[in-house]
Amino acid sequence: MGQPETYFGVHRLFVDIYCLQHPDQGCVSFKSLAAHLAHLCWSLEFKGNRAVPSEAIRRWVERHPHLEKPALPEHRGRMTVADVAKAENPAAHHQAVEQWARSTWDAYADLQSTARHWVTLAYEGDRAGRVLEQAATRVITRRRPAARRHSSRRR
C-alpha cells in the first residue's frame, strides 16, 4: 500500500469526510460539526490545505462554541470510506479521497452556504485579529525601551 507519509497529503480532508459521514461519532457538538464542515468547504472551494487544518478556522470555531448546530442531512454521500480503501497506491488514494470529498460535499448541499459563511467569518476575523495583534505588539515594543531604562536605574 505504500508508506503512511505518502498518504498524508489528504489526511485532514479524509478525517473531515469520515466525521461528516459518521456524525454520531465525529460531529456531536456544534464545534466538531463546524470544524469538519468548514474545513471540507475550505479544502474544496477555497483550495485549502488537505493535509493540515486551518488555524483561522480552528480559532473561529473555538470562539463560537455556543452557536446552534444545524440539522444534518439524512443521506451523507454516495461514496464511503470502503470505496477509498480500494485504492491501490497513493495517487489512487488521493483521487479517491477527492471524489469522496465531492460526494460528501454534495450531500451537504443544504449546509454549503452556511459552511462558506463560517469560512469567510473565520478568515475575516483572523485578518482583523492579526491587525489588532500587530498594533498591540507595536505599542508594547515602543514601551519596552522606556521600561528597560527604568529598571536599569533601580539597580
Image: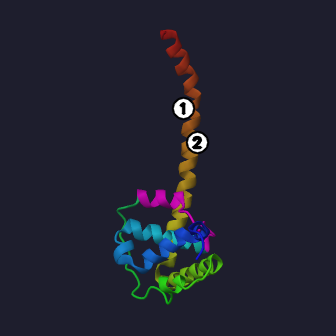
User: Residue 25 falls in which quadrant of the image?
Assistant: bottom left
Distance from disc 2 to disc 1, alpha carbons, whole Å, reads 10 Å
User: Which one is nearer the viewer's eye here, 15 or 127?
Assistant: 15
Residue 54 image position (x, y, % from top left): 54, 61
Q: Secondary structure at mark 2?
A: helix
- 39 lies above or below 95: above
Task: Point out which mark residue 140 bears.
Answer: 1
Task: Point out which mark residue 134 bears.
Answer: 2
Disc 2 marks which amino acid? Gln
User: Residue 87 falls in which quadrant of the image?
Assistant: bottom right
Which residues are drawn in magenta?
45-63
User: Which one is nearer the viewer's eye here, 49 or 110?
Assistant: 49
Disc 1 marks which amino acid? Ile
Q: Is residue 21 magenta?
A: no
Are the two marked residues, 2 and 1, in contact with CB atoms closer than 8 angstroms? no
Q: Residue at x 49, y 9 (%)?
A: 155
Task: Point out which mark residue 86 bears.
Answer: none
Residue 20 image position (x, y, % from top left): 44, 77
The mark nearer the N terminus, 2 or 1, is 2
Q: Residue at x 48, y 72 (%)?
A: 16
Quadrant location, the N terminus: bottom right
Residue 125 image position (x, y, % from top left): 52, 56
